[in-house]
Image (spheres, helix red, strand yellow):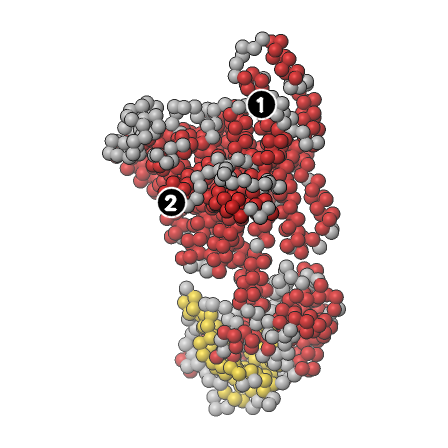
Amino acid sequence: MNTVLRVEGLTVHYYTLRGVVRAVEDASLEAGKGELVALVGESGCGKSTLGYSLLKLVPPPGRIVKGRVLVEDKDIVSLSGEALRRARGELVSIVFQDPFTTLDPVRTIGDQLAEVMTEHGVGEEEARARVGELLESVGLPRELAKRYPHQLSGGQRQRVAIAAAIALDPRVLVADEPTTALDVIVQKQIMDLIDDIRRRTGMAVILITHDIALAAERADKIAIMYAGKIVEYGPKSLVLRNPLHPYTRALIASVPDIDSDKWPEPIPGYPPDLRRPPPGCRFAPRCPRAMPVCKEKEPPRIRVADRIVSCWLYRGG
Amino acid sequence: MVEVVTVVARKLRLGLGSLLGDLPGAARKLAIAGTVIVGVIIAMAVFAPLIAPYDPTKMVDSPLLPPSAKHLLGTDMLGRDMFSRIVYGGRIVLWVVALATALSAAIGIPLGLLSGYHGGKTDRALSMVMDAIYAFPSLILAIALAAVLGPSPVNAAIAISVVYIPTYFRMVRGQVLQIKATPFIESARALGIPASRIMTRHILPHLLPTIMVVFSLSAADAVLTEAALSFLGLAVRPPTPDWGFDLYAAKGFIQSAPWLIMGPGVMITLLALGLALIGEGLGEKVRRTIG
Amino acid sequence: MGLARYVAVRGALIIPSVLILYTIAFIILRILPGNPILAVLGTKNIPPEQLRALEHQLGLDKPLYVQYFDYLWRALHGDFGQSLVIRGRPIAADLASRLPATIELAVAGLFVSLVLGLGTGLVAGLRRDTKIDTAMRIYGALTYTLFIPWLGLMFQLVFSVWLHWLPVSGRIDPRVHLRTITGLYLLDSLLTGNWAAFKSALAHIVLPALTLGIVLSGPYTRLLRNNLAVVLDSNFILAYRAHGVREKRITWHAFRNAIIPVVTYAGLQFALLLGGAVLTETTFDWPGVGTYLVEKIQYRDYPAIQAVILVFALIVGLISLIVDIIYAYLDPRIRY
């Protein structure tokens, strides 16, 4: 079977003291073997929340309200307790944004990597042996296992984080802005590493980023998120060269292009307060092509060729 | 008389209300409780002649009587009324603590300001001395000082103040060092404003909130230190009533007259508690305003 | 730098503070009270020749700075001088017999305060923002306002006088015979297999240790709770969870991280521990350096008081050195 990850109708809300924040609403996507799906959107659009929910790692007061996250036919959302603990790392894994704070400062790299494995049933000796291999597979020397995180550079630490994430050979890797905290050269190295791993092992990668250029470089498929909803989703080349959703179009137009004479165009207005999202389409207040129906009813997912768009403009397919 | 008290009480409540206004429920209640406790104890000490039924230094009845309507806290081993001794004892404690805290602040704060601002060898030497004193067990130093000076409230106050000078010094100096590096102090110096003016007008006001917090907390500590000195016989000479001393006296009669330890013991802890609560409340307020 | 060099450098720093305190003690005890002999004897009616003879005998007629270095030099060789009051009695011998008692009490008190403080801090940190958390934090903020003698006396009242469960005072039942090796009764009774002595020593140390421990436990509660709160929110804890590490192990890792500042604080608190020990000793008639100091004060035995201060300064310096070493061991970021 080629589809490794299937997300269906995922809805995540945060029940805060100041109201219910509808962070992710009815999100659906798929990833095949070895595919990289980029989840693109501006800050606060819910992409990180969506990424975390693939491991059921949404912090309280957040909760997955509806939907399924299927990895090899197991629904992560339905898991809890020991089963959930095992699934994390074995089925789905994650690499976080900030490599400077995601490693335990008082333990050696080797200890932390070994623990990921021993906590999942691997024997102590075998785990230690595999640590060396793991480090090599992410391009780090074996001796690094004796070191502490603060003795490593940011790029090295991120590689360690990746090593920890792939230690148990998961089917899906969520990469939450893995290179934002690093410089461009290291960024390329890290992304090359991720590409190499997914090609070797067939692991699917969900890349969360606000950087369309990065998505353009690396993704097979792109999902554009706005205000908690996936507004457009499809193969990269189609989405970028022929954007359907007005937001996608505006987003692309807002990226500076060194070859073009035109100034980038910012999108007027602000994203909505997700405690009180507007009725109907969430982008309608800022949309240059908004129609009356947009302000009344939320657009459904509409299939247009190989893509899925949530926009009334494409009513009828 | 009653009107005066009510007016004063209301004014205090208003002032306190604005001061503690934005603290969350539990913290606010505790801070107010602290203020009330301290206020009541101060009032008790001030109005001692009106409240105490007997002369605290005179024998008025048989010794070691249990609490009764005639003697609310019983009588001590010399036949003196414990309740009166407690009421008057507050005077000594408050006097010593106030004097000690005032002295250590009056010496520690200017020293910290000057040392922190001017820096250099004097600052380093002074800091080393202050650090050495600060690291040393305060009670032991106070005991040694009080022993040498002789038992009297003033001497006890001096002994206690020496121990707390480093607290003020370090706190003020630390903050001065931080503030000294800020651009607005640099511009003040560039404008040629004299150092003394910079310190008093520009730096000191920023320290006031933290000073107030340290003030209450070190006052709470000073109460316990005074009580300790008094317990060891280094603060007052008999027959002057003092809580710590009375507690020590009661120690010997713990089997025959256990109630005697309650009065002094509870009062010491209560006063320290009240001051600590105020200090915690102020500390929380400072954290919220600055933090 | 390596651990050994760190220790050496750090160790050298003790010397200035010990010297400072010795100087302060010297000033207080030699210069302030006027003629110490008169103070001890309490009378001014001595024929001057006799006074001078006494002064000469005790070396008090030498210039002050000579006395200063003299005493220091001899102290470094273990001679803390002789008691002014009990003529000819070496202070060092007294201190040697009393010091273990204080150390035993201080360690027991530290143990209790750590257990109570870290325990409440852990509970509060794990149950953040609940009523339990608030209760623990109130405990932490207010235990130090308890007056040690009063708490001690209350314990005596309840557990000794009323319940007869525990002895009122002293260090061990005088009828029990214990051969001492270190001077630490609990240790010695275990080393010599003397079960009766162990039980007695334990029974005697419970109340003093509890008193001292409760009063000093508060800061640990707050410290651990706040650190734990910070650590539990940090990314590497989230990363542990994301990698499927068991909750219990995650708590342990969080604890290991959160506890580092606690070690430093324990060191800083040692001075408080010693001060509190003095007060506890007086309350429970515990034969340690604290009660020794109080006795000597009553007799105006200045050399003895000076010796006590010197010894305490040394102990505090040593403890802070040990704490720094432990800290360097726990937090690898300091070492490398």
Q: Tell me if label 2 and label 1 are in contact, CB under 8 Å.
A: no
Q: Position of residue C95 (x, y in %)?
A: 60, 33
Going by the picture, which residue comes out furthest to the left? B69
Q: Position of residue C134 (x, y in %)?
A: 42, 54
What residue did someone put label 1 on? C86
Q: Position of residue A67 (x, y in %)?
A: 47, 80
C-alpha distance separating marks 2 and 1: 40 Å
Write the residue at 27% across / 31% down.
B71
Q: Chain of mark 2?
A: C
Q: Residues within 10 Å of mark 1 (few under 14, many from 20)?
A: few
Write the residue at 62% across / 71% down.
A118
Mark with earlier residue (2, 1): 1
- Specify the amino acid type for callout 1: Ile
Tell whether B64 sits left or right of C63. left
What residue did someone put label 2 on? C163
Write the residue at 52% across / 69% down.
A44
Q: Please tell me whether mark 1 sits on a helix, a strand or a loop.
A: loop
Q: Position of residue C172 (x, y in %)?
A: 50, 40
Tell whether C191 sits left or right of B70. right
Q: Is residue A6 above or below residue B9?
A: below
In depth, the one of A201 and B117 nearer the eye is: A201
- Specify the amino acid type for callout 2: Leu
In depth, the one of C294 and A47 nearer the eye is: C294
Write the residue at 49% across / 78% down.
A79
Q: Is residue C292 above or below residue A103?
A: above
Q: Quadrant of residue B182?
A: top right
